């Protein structure tokens, strides 16, 4: 069974950093575009970063560009999201996904990130 399991969320002060991880299993991770999305209650899912299968390309939405880095370890079927200089508006549940946007075919259960002093 294909599965994605996120971890690494938590409570962090503004200006702090977190590294989120996503363990993938049950599908060909090394051939898949992967992405991160986030959602706050009452708002739509926001796709924030994607990375190609070989890490040849990654891109970010404007609100996290320069503060986020998406990376992957194909040998260990793991996706990462490094978040720096966190802001209160980054508070959300973060999800990793196989695919991106309308092309997403699998999503994890999410990990909560709360940025607060």
Image (cartoon, helix red, strand yellow):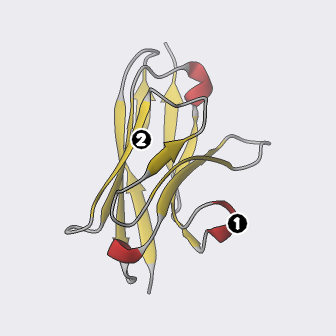
Q: Position of residue 48 (x, y in %)?
A: 57, 44
Q: How many marks?
A: 2
Q: Residue furthest bottom?
A: 1
Residue at image coords 38%, 20%: 16
Tag 1–tag 2 contact (CB < 8 Å):
no
Q: Residue furthest right?
A: 42
Q: Secondary structure at mark 2?
A: loop
Cα–Cα gap, marks 1 and 2: 25 Å
Residue at image coords 47%, 23%: 86
Location of residue 23 with respect to 70 vertically, above or below: below
Q: Position of residue 10 (x, y in %)?
A: 42, 36
Residue at image coords 73%, 42%: 41
In screen coordinates, is 75 left or right of 89?
A: left
Which of the two discs, 1 and 2, sits closer to the camera? 1
Q: Position of residue 93 (x, y in %)?
A: 57, 45
Location of residue 98 with respect to 43 vertically, above or below: below
Circle 2: is it few (<14), some (14-19), or many (20+) Cα within 10 Å? some
Q: Which residue is mark 2?
A: 9
Q: Position of residue 35 (x, y in %)?
A: 50, 56
Circle 1: is it few (<14), some (14-19), or many (20+) Cα within 10 Å? few
Q: Quadrant of residue 72?
A: bottom left
In screen coordinates, is 117 left or right of 43?
A: left
Location of residue 41 with respect to 100 vertically, above or below: above
Q: Residue furthest front?
A: 56
Q: Which mark is residue 41?
A: none
Q: Quadrant of residue 68?
A: top left
First reached walking from the N terminus: tag 1 or tag 2: 2
Q: Which mark is residue 102?
A: 1
Q: Secondary structure at mark 1?
A: helix
Q: Name the quadrant of the N terminus.
A: bottom left
In screen coordinates, is 54 left or right of 117?
A: left
Judge by depth and name the residue closer to the eye, 49 or 20: 49
């Amino acid at each position: 069974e294909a599965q994605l399991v996120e971890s690494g969320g938590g409570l962090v002060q503004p200006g702090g950093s977190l590294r989120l991880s996503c363990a993938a299993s049950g599908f060909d991770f090394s051939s898949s575009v992967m992405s991160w999305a986030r959602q706050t209650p009452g708002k739509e899912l926001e796709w924030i970063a994607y990375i190609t299968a070989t890490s040849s390309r990654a891109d970010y939405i404007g609100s996290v560009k320069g503060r986020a880095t998406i990376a992957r370890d194909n040998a260990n079927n793991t996706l990462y999201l490094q978040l720096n200089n966190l802001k209160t508006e980054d508070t959300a549940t973060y999800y990793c996904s196989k695919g991106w946007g309308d092309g997403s075919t699998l999503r994890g259960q999410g990990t909560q990130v709360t940025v607060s002093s």
